[in-house]
Image (cartoon, rainbow, N blue to C red):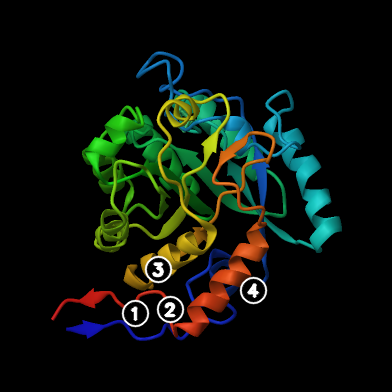
């Protein structure tokens, strides 16, 4: 069995990190400006379901600065000077993050995306959505925008196991994700997936096996993070009535290291850690910041001489 060699581009971290990948392309760090375009979600408004995914509380990932009361243009114009002052940032991706950011007719989407792109510092878009919320017209729009911009569509998948998708009331199955993927690849659009590790419906081995599965798919970008039990969610009720194990901090670091070892080195890592505000987080409570986590992960991977793709079996 052959295994992947240490990727030559890996510099500061032992995996293919998004920040470095963007710097390699654009020559400078690229910063995300988060916007809330006022979308809702078919898994909440009744089109698919009213309950939403059982872990979902959008307050856990909506930064205070972005609000749908302001237009996309206003949010971009407010977000960019802040990032410039704070980090000396020069290039930006507008990130359509909360809820389902392709959940509107194609003309509305075009207007919102063009508004976001209409700023000299903006080099492209990152669009978080559900795999059941794209169609041929929306993909054609994204393909058109991607001709001269960076356009990344991030599909929420969360798990490749249908029993988990059912448990979390995701409202679509794994086959739906694969259909969306095949509709999107080969069109100049970058494709990402979002996974959560730690659902009580999966064993540790099954979670790790998702790295093998994703590595075989045409996915270029990945966000993965620990399951968090957040207040005012159906998962919080389940957890209260019948507590289930959540990751310990060290345990999760080991899990992520192993996951990365099995993951294709070509997949760019956008996220490895979730950090819901402490006032709404029930479990697991680690009291660690994202930067502490990334340092501890680096240290752990260094000690084990570990890097992304090292345990990935290559054909032949
Ligand atoms: S996690 Fe996303 S898809 Fe699920 S209910 Fe929340 S906004 Fe909708």
How far, Cα to Cα, is label 2 from label 4? 24 Å
> Foreground mark, 3 or 4?
3
Mark 2 and mark 1 in contact? Answer it, CB < 8 Å: yes
Q: Disc 1 and disc 4: Cα gap in Å?
A: 27 Å
The correct choice, above or below, for 67 with respect to 13 in the image is above
Label 4 sits on a secondary structure element that is loop
Task: Identify the mark nearer the N-term, 1 or 4.
Answer: 4
Q: Report the residue marked by disc 2.
A: 307
Q: Which mark is residue 233?
A: none
Q: Residue at x 59, y 70 (%)?
A: 296
The C terminus, quarter of image: bottom left
Which structural element holds mark 2? Answer: loop
Whole-percent x and y of residue 188?
40, 55
Q: Please identify, in this view, whether the residue under mark 2 or under mark 4 is nearer the observer.
A: 2
- In this figure, which residue is indicated by the disc labeled 3? 260
Sooner in the amino-acid sequence: mark 2 or mark 4: 4
Q: Is residue 176 visible?
A: no
Q: Residues within 10 Å of mark 1 (few under 14, many from 20)?
A: many
Q: Marks 3/4: CA distance?
A: 26 Å
At x 47%, y 24%, the residue is 237
Disc 1, SS: loop
> What residue would you read off at disc 1?
310
């Amino acid at each position: 069995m052959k295994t992947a060699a240490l990727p030559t581009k890996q510099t500061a971290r032992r995996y293919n990190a998004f920040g470095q990948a963007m710097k390699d392309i654009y020559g400078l760090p690229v910063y995300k400006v988060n916007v809330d375009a006022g979308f809702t979600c078919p898994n909440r408004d009744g089109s698919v379901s009213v309950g939403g995914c059982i872990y979902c509380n959008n307050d856990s990932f909506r930064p205070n600065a972005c609000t749908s009361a302001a237009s996309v243009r206003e949010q971009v114009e407010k977000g960019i000077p802040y990032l410039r002052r704070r980090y000396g940032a020069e290039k930006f991706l507008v990130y359509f993050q909360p809820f389902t950011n392709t959940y509107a007719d194609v003309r509305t989407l075009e207007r919102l995306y063009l508004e976001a792109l209409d700023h000299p510092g903006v080099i492209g878009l990152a669009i978080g959505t559900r795999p059941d919320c794209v169609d041929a017209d929306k993909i054609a729009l994204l393909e058109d925008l991607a001709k001269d911009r960076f356009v990344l569509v991030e599909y929420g998948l969360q798990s490749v196991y249908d029993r988990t998708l059912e448990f979390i009331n995701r409202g679509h199955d794994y086959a739906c994700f694969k259909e969306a993927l095949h509709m999107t690849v080969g069109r100049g659009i970058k494709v990402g997936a979002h996974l959560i590790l730690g659902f009580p419906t999966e064993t540790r081995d099954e979670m790790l096996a998702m790295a093998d599965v994703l590595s075989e798919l045409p996915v270029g970008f990945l966000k993965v993070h620990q399951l968090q039990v957040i207040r005012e969610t159906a998962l919080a009720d389940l957890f209260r009535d019948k507590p289930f194990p959540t990751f310990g901090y060290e345990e999760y670091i080991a899990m992520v290291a192993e996951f990365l070892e099995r993951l294709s080195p070509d997949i760019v890592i956008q996220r490895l850690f979730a950090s819901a505000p402490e006032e709404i987080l029930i479990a697991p409570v680690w009291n660690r910041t994202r930067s502490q986590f990334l340092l501890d992960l680096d240290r752990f991977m260094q000690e084990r001489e570990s890097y992304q793709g090292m345990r990935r079996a290559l054909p032949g």
